[in-house]
């Protein structure tokens, strides 16, 4: 069974999360340097069937674009070109980084681990994906 992959795209780092094959729960996959993202995705999609890619869409609280929105839109175009067989859908990513930090505190993560931006990006992608699953199941 195919998975759903969520991407929290960033200029420097990108967080990735994926569902289990039954699409019941989201789990953090990794965070990669954005410059290495397509290399990573090509390898991952070669090894794992993915039926949908979710990309976090940065928006302000009033639904206007943020400074990062054009970067994400360009990324989505390239993603669709590189992987035309996999549908791409955007999801609201507002507050996911803040929620990720709160989740790390609640889990009792050490301050040093909470300051690791890769952890934040991976957990933010996981939150986006879990929220998607809750709305669509």
Image: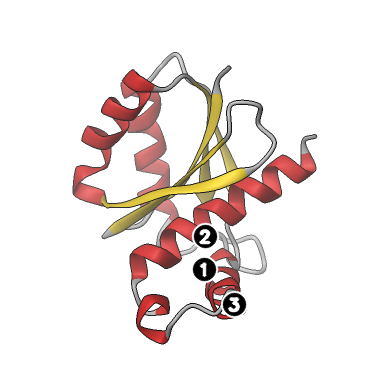
Residue 92 visible in the current orientation: no
Q: Which residue is mark 2?
A: 124
**Residue at mark 1 to residue at mark 2: CA–CA distance:** 5 Å
Q: Secondary structure at mark 2?
A: helix
Q: Which residue is mark 3?
A: 102
Residue visible at 52% across and 68% down in the picture? 97
Quadrant assignment, res 122? bottom left
Mark 3 Cα-neighbour bin, 10 Å: few <14, some 14–19, many ≥20: some
Q: Quadrant of the C terminus?
A: top right
**Residue at mark 1 to residue at mark 3: CA–CA distance:** 9 Å
Residue visible at 41% across and 16% down in the picture? 84
Q: Taking 82 as reference, is 35 left or right? A: left
Q: Which residue is mark 1?
A: 97
Q: What sort of colour scheme is used for the picture?
A: secondary structure
Residue visible at 66% across and 48% down in the picture? 130
Do the residues bearing badges 1 and 2 touch, measured as CB atoms within 8 Å?
yes
């Amino acid at each position: 069974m195919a998975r759903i992959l969520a991407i929290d795209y960033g200029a420097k780092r990108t967080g990735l999360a994926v569902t289990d094959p039954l699409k019941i729960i989201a789990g953090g996959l990794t965070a990669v340097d954005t410059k290495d993202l397509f290399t990573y995705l090509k390898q991952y999609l070669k090894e794992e069937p993915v039926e949908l890619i979710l990309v976090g869409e940065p928006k302000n609280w009033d639904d206007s674009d943020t400074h990062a929105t054009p970067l994400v839109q360009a990324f989505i175009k390239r993603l669709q070109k590189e992987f035309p067989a996999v549908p791409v859908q955007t999801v609201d990513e507002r507050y996911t980084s803040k929620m990720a930090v709160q989740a790390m505190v609640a889990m009792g993560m050490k301050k040093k681990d909470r300051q690791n931006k890769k952890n934040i990006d991976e957990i933010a992608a996981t939150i986006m994906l879990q929220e998607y699953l809750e709305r669509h199941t």
